[in-house]
Amino acid sequence: MKKTAYILAFALTLGSFALHAQTDTTQTTYTYVTAKEDLTAKFLPMPDPLTMEKIFPATGNFQLTQTNIEGATEINIMLDSANKGLVWIEGLPMGKIKAQLRQSPATYKIPAQKTEDGKSIEEGTLVYDKEANILNICLGCTYDETEPAKPFTIATETMDSEATTKKVTKKTSSSKAKVWNYTGAKLIVEEEVTTDEMENPQQKEENKEMKKEQKEEQKEEKEEIEQK
């Protein structure tokens, strides 16, 4: 009796395996893709080398566009030789003025200072907008840490109102310091692109090989002439 039960159980197990094998006919196929290097890709042009003027765009020569500073014309802004966080403004009638970098790349605070000539300079702000190519300098306005460019919108309105006012009024005593403004545009010198800079790396290598072959041919010709 037990033997018959074992045989029956074994037969049922085999039957279930056979049924599973018949119904589960789906197979999973795995595809392996091997990445290949695209040797036909074009060479991208090399980026322009970084210069001090690109890292610190507020440096350079600036041409006057608007000011209320009498005698102001073109100015030059240059980096301090020892501290790249400082620039010096030259060309204003007040003398050589120092400015401290506060927000990169071109927002500076002008601290209250005395020039080499002993003239007192009130605190101010210098901001250069590279995209618009506009330099703004304000002397006598407190540097605003949150909105450094805010004084320049007010300064434009003030300068316009002063220019249109012609009525003479009595002098009144005031403790408020004079605010001086200077607006200028950077004098940009366009660099000429040489033939070597226009060539891609592959062309440069081919030209190099060609020059090498020409030198070898000239050397062989010279040796033949000397042998004759």
Image (cartoon, rainbow, N blue to C red):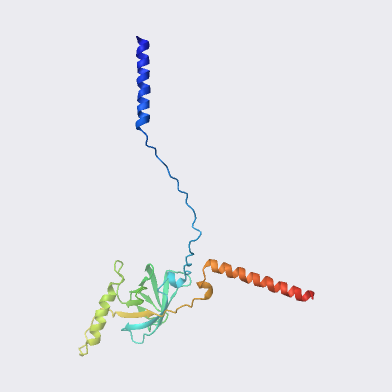
**Does residue 60 appear left or right of residue 211 in this picture?**
left
**Does residue 141 appear left or right of residue 52 in this picture?**
left
Figure check: 14 above or below 199: above
Q: Nearer the viewer, residue 192 or 200?
A: 200
The quarter of the rendered structure image containing the N terminus is top left
Residue 193: x, y in percent?
49, 76
Q: Nearer the viewer, residue 112 or 83?
A: 83
Residue 154: x, y in percent?
25, 76
The quarter of the rendered structure image containing the C terminus is bottom right
Q: Residue visible at 37% across and 80% down?
A: 185
Extreme residue toward the right, this view: 228
Q: Quadrant of residue 204?
A: bottom right
Q: Nearer the viewer, residue 66 or 35?
A: 35
Figure check: 25 above or below 32: above
Residue 38: x, y in percent?
49, 57
Q: Residue visible at 36% across and 23% down?
A: 15
Extreme residue toward the front, this view: 22
Q: Nearer the viewer, residue 119 or 41?
A: 41
Residue 192: x, y in percent?
48, 78
Q: Residue visible at 35% across and 29% down?
A: 20
Q: Residue 152, can we see it?
A: yes
Q: Residue visible at 65% across and 70% down?
A: 213
Figure check: 177 above or below 56: below
Q: Residue 96, can we see it?
A: no
**Does residue 95 appear left or right of residue 161 in this picture?**
right
